[in-house]
Image (cartoon, grey):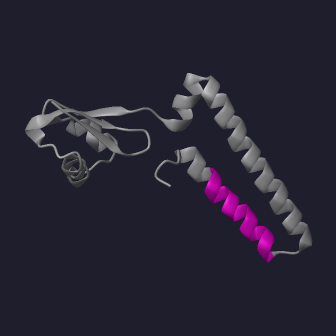
Amino acid sequence: MGQFTPFDLLVVMLLSEAVSNGLSGGEESVTGAWILAAALILMNGLLGFLSSRSKRLERLLEGSPVLIGRDGKWFLDVMQRHRLGEADVQKALREADCSLGELKLAILESDGTISVLKR
């Protein structure tokens, strides 16, 4: 789940909603659920194919990395804009076995993880 793009997560949520309505209804709703599920899967595959060919579409669907810290200093305005708390960045520092003084770069990746580079 951590490697899902926001669009993939949306498709999974819509897919589960489409199938659940088909399971609780009559036979005609099962057919409708299959059609809707196939359309969602095809759309996801088509957008995946197109985004692999277009950098602009890929950036639109998957997002882009954001610099949140450099040379031992956090960019608090960027962190607030992306709703990152102090606990999140401290956890990333601990996971990278890096102190704030050793921080060279901290990057919020498009999948929500924080990458930390030491000096």
State whether residue 95 is above or below residue 78.
below
Residue 88, x across and y down, in percent: 26, 52
**Residue in the image at 64% along x and 51% along y:** 11
Residue 45, x across and y down, in percent: 70, 40
Magenta stretch prevailing secondary structure: helix
**Residue in the image at 32% along x and 41% along y:** 81
For residue 12, side relative to residue 1 (left or right): right
Where the C terminus falls, by quadrant? top left
Q: Nearer the viewer, residue 32 or 101?
A: 101
Q: Nearer the viewer, residue 74 or 103?
A: 103
* Magenta residue span: 11-24
Residue 44, x across and y down, in percent: 68, 43
Tell me which corner region of the image, top left, top right, bottom left or bottom right, holds residue 23: bottom right
**Residue in the image at 39% along x and 33% along y:** 65
Of all residues, the one furthest to the left in this rendering is 101
Q: Is 47 covered by the magenta stretch?
A: no
Q: Nearer the viewer, residue 78 or 69?
A: 69
For residue 53, side relative to residue 111 (left or right): right
Residue 25, x across and y down, in percent: 83, 75
For residue 75, side relative to residue 44 (left or right): left
Q: Is 18 covered by the magenta stretch?
A: yes
For residue 38, side relative to residue 15 (left or right): right
**Residue in the image at 47% along x and 35% along y:** 63
